[in-house]
Image (cartoon, rainbow, N blue to C red):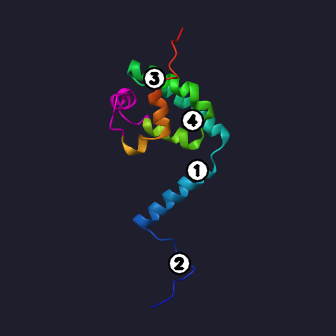
Amino acid sequence: MAAPSEDRPPRSGPDSALDAAAQAAAHKAAAETPQDLATRKRRLVFRAWHRGIKEADLILGQFVERHVDGWGEDDIRWMERLFEENDQDILTWITAPDPAIPEPFDTPLMAALRALDYMRPRA
């Protein structure tokens, strides 16, 4: 059996596509700058106030507006993932007395959302 060659061309096939995708994701994460985080935070504020259901706009908009400045990469990623979910589900997880919150969303950030202590009347 021949030893692996150093000058072999890169592999092709499904594994190489996964390797390339992982490398691209790692490169993107490494290239993340504070400006990129600031842009993502502004987008979160906009998305929070434009959900499509007024109740979701009020709850999520006020929460994100009040807390987004103190968030890091993980909190932003969590909120972006939450915003991919259905508004009815999000509202249930936040407002129901004892909801079945899916594991990826059952976090301290969801507990803060459920507290509703950030709600203030808007003038």
- In the rendered structure, the answer to whether residue 77 lies left or right of residue 72 reads left
Query: Do the CB atoms of the residues marked 4 and 3 lie less than 8 Å apart?
Result: no
What's the residue at 42%, 41% (across, down)?
106
Callout 3, which amino acid?
Ile
Outermost right residue: 34
Which element type, helix, strand or loop, lies under badge 1?
helix
Please report the bounds of the magenta region as a residue range. Answer: 83-101
Which element type, helix, strand or loop, lies under badge 2?
loop
Query: Do the CB atoms of the residues marked 1 and 2 lie less than 8 Å apart?
Result: no
State the mark number for residue 99. none
- Expressed as whole percent of the image width and height from the top left, the position of residue 49 reads 48, 22
Measure the alpha-carbon separation of dots 4 and 3: 19 Å
- List the residue tagged with mark 3: 59
Measure the alpha-carbon separation of dots 4 and 1: 14 Å
Callout 4, which amino acid?
Arg
Most foreground residue, 87 or 13: 87
Query: Do the CB atoms of the residues marked 1 and 3 lie less than 8 Å apart?
Result: no
- List the residue tagged with mark 4: 40
Query: Up-down: is 46 above or below 33?
Result: above
